[in-house]
Amino acid sequence: MTINTPPQTLSLQDVSSLDATLKDFSLAERLALVAGLGSRSVFTTSLGIEDQVITAAIGTHRLPIDVATLETGRLFAETVRLIEETEDRYGITITRFYPEQDDIDAYAEKYGLNGFYESVEARHACCHVRKLIPLAKALEGAGFWITGLRRGQSGNRASTPFAEYDAERNLIKINPLADWDIDAIKAHVAAENIPVNPLHARGYPSIGCEPCTRAIKPGEPERAGRWWWENDEKRECGLHVAEAAQSSISPAPQN
Ligand code: SF4
């Protein structure tokens, strides 16, 4: 496996400075700046509405950023179709990263194919097989990981920065839409005629795997329809783990 290669010349102070610099830029400028920093940049899209805004910017401005998605095998048919539609629209390739069949079989044997409803442990185990392992492959060799995280998506994401060091993956995570609210996203999509998932119009502001996503009621938080049977208000799939203790950048693994 190829290790991630964060820009070694960037200290934590530099990351903080980058975070401050990005604040005053437009979306396209934020992406172009990061893409020009010399390390491989990977954008992972779930095809959600904010991710479509980022993909459109990458495609429209022909930015040297790799676009990848985690094809979990449990996506909505609408999401799968949108991957192809988006590729055609912007003339880009969205690389699909799939789970390993052996891992799925082992999960199904231990928990059952839909065992994720039974416990948080079983749900995390499924996300690990179908998302986290493929994510690690998608980010191999990357120095920058671009995401569509926004502060308004949930209380858990309320302090999302523009740039942060991801100690677990040893790279710098860039959240270029951190300060965009959902109204700004929708206005931009309408103005640019960006293709979006038709499920958004049916009450799904946040869309993940089909068995783990449902429509929300008016007034509910954007991510209330994700793993709705769990009580933990901070539920996530593990892709975006909290990085509370980041006092220093650890050196990149040497092998
Ligand atoms: S969101 Fe649901 S189906 Fe998708 S990987 Fe996680 S537990 Fe499995």
Image (cartoon, rainbow, N blue to C red):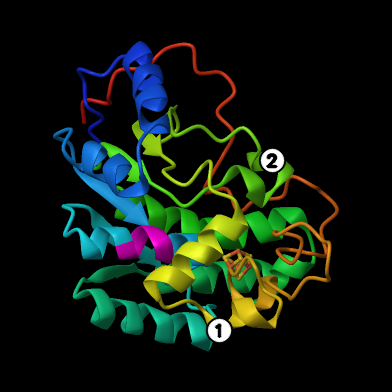
The residue lying furthest to the front in this view is: 191
Q: Residue at x 41, y 87 (%)?
A: 81
Mark yes or no: residue 140 visible: no
Residue 21, above or below 174: above
Task: Verify whether residue 55 appears in magenta.
Answer: yes
In the drawing, does residue 158 fall left or right of residue 87?
right
Q: Nearer the viewer, residue 186 or 8?
A: 186
Q: Which mark is residue 135?
A: none
Q: Nearer the viewer, residue 12 or 54?
A: 54
Q: Amino acid at mark 1?
A: Pro
Q: Which residues are magenta?
A: 52-56
Q: Earlier in the sequence, mark 1 or mark 2?
A: 2
Quadrant of ligand 1: it is bottom right
Q: Which residue is tagged 2?
A: 156
Residue 41, above or below 196: above
Q: Give residue 27's position: percent from left, percent from top.
A: 36, 47
Q: Amino acid at mark 2?
A: Asn
Q: Which residue is tagged 1?
A: 198
